[in-house]
Image (cartoon, rainbow, N blue to C red):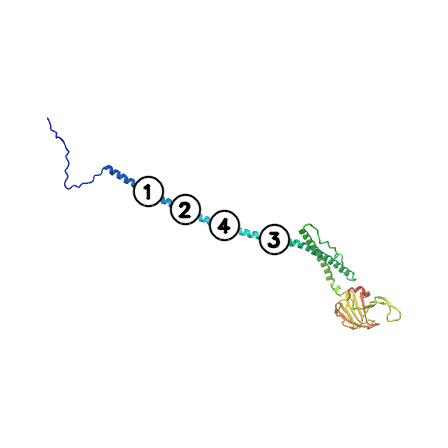
């Protein structure tokens, strides 16, 4: 059965209702493209923000490290300045020390020069001191010899007091060593002399009472008209007699001095021909007589010293003119008084 086919079959289109709006139709491909672009933009934006954030963090870390390095640099700069100041101070001190050393070296040179100049002067002084020591030894020997020459003076010897003095000068090529030798030698000699003179002083102190009272000076200054011993009787008769003392002619009223210290044993008129007589007990058995005085100035029992005026000269008793009869007796026996007259007054 034949069917009829329309000439053209056209689809049926829906009819638009009068109230339906019209929309822009965008292809789906464009939509995907736009979405992809937006997603890419967001991704780039996020990455950019992340990188910016990392940059800020890194920049802050770099700034902090830079500040730390800057602080360290400032500290190092400060330390460098301090070290520079210390170095300058040390250099100044070194300069000052060098100047001080130079001054001290100059002073040492001056002192060395002065020492060299004074060495000869010390040599002369040492020789002078040695000469003085020698002279002192001679004087000491003279004193001891004089003491030993005095009779009836016990306890004084010169055996231990007259030791020879060694030379104080030693010889050396080294001035310092020479100086030391001289000082040691002079000190030793001075110690020896001091010890020796101490012995002498001990002897003097022991015998001082004897020495103080020992009759050693002249009773008056005058001419000896009659000495000790046998003589012709001055009173006449042509006979000889023993003169127990010495007669010293002086003017009337001349001061008569005690020749040594002691105690007055007799003072006044003597009936044995002495006239006005003074007798002094000088100790150790020694007595001194002073006769023919015009006046007696001391009393019996009085203590007198050497050189004290005890009477006035005269011509009392058995006398032919003004004079002093001086007599020394030892243990009651008359001895030659001239041996005791060691010192002229």
Q: Which residue is mark 1?
A: 48
The residue at 36%/44% (across/down) is: 55
N-term-proximal mark, 1 vs 3: 1
Callouts 2 and 1 close, C-beta under 8 Å: no
**Residue 44 in sight here:** yes
Q: Secondary structure at mark 4?
A: helix
- The C terminus is located in which quarter? bottom right
N-term-proximal mark, 4 vs 2: 2
Q: Which residue is mark 2?
A: 66
Q: Secondary structure at mark 1?
A: helix
Give residue 89's position: percent from left, percent from top: 52, 52
Give residue 317's position: percent from left, percent from top: 83, 72
N-term-proximal mark, 2 vs 1: 1
Q: Pointer 1: residues within 10 angstroms few (<14), some, or many (20+)?
A: few
- The N terminus is located in which quarter? top left
N-term-proximal mark, 4 vs 1: 1
Q: Which residue is mark 4?
A: 84
């Amino acid at each position: 059965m034949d069917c009829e086919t329309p000439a053209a079959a056209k689809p049926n289109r829906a009819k638009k209702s009068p109230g339906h709006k019209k929309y822009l139709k965008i292809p789906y491909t464009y939509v995907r493209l736009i979405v992809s672009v937006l997603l890419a933009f967001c991704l780039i934006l996020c990455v950019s923000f992340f990188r910016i954030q990392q940059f800020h963090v890194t920049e802050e870390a770099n700034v902090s490290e830079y500040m730390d390095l800057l602080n360290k640099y400032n500290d190092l700069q400060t330390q460098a300045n301090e070290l520079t100041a210390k170095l300058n101070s040390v250099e100044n001190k070194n300069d000052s020390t060098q100047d001080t050393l130079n001054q001290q070296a100059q002073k040492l040179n001056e002192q060395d020069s002065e020492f060299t100049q004074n060495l000869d002067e010390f040599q002369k002084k040492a020789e002078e001191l040695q000469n003085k020591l020698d002279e002192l030894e001679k004087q000491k020997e003279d004193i001891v010899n004089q003491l030993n020459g005095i009779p009836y003076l016990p306890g004084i010897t010169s055996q231990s007091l007259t030791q020879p003095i060694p030379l104080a000068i030693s010889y050396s090529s080294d001035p310092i060593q020479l100086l030391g030798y001289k000082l040691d030698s002079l000190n030793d000699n001075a110690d020896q002399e001091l010890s020796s003179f101490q012995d002498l002083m001990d002897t003097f102190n022991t015998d001082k009472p004897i020495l103080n009272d020992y009759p050693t000076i002249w009773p008056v200054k005058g001419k000896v008209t009659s000495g000790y011993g046998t003589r012709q009787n001055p009173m006449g008769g042509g006979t000889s007699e023993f003169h127990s003392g010495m007669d010293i002619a002086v003017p009337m009223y001349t001061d008569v001095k005690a020749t040594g210290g002691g105690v007055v044993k007799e003072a006044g008129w003597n009936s044995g021909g002495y006239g006005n007589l003074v007798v002094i007990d000088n100790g150790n058995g020694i007595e001194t007589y002073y006769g023919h005085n015009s006046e007696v100035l001391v009393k019996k029992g009085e203590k007198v010293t050497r050189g004290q005026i005890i009477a006035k000269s005269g011509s009392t008793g058995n006398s032919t003119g003004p004079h002093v009869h001086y007599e020394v007796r030892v243990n009651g026996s008359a001895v030659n008084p001239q041996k005791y007259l060691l010192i002229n007054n």
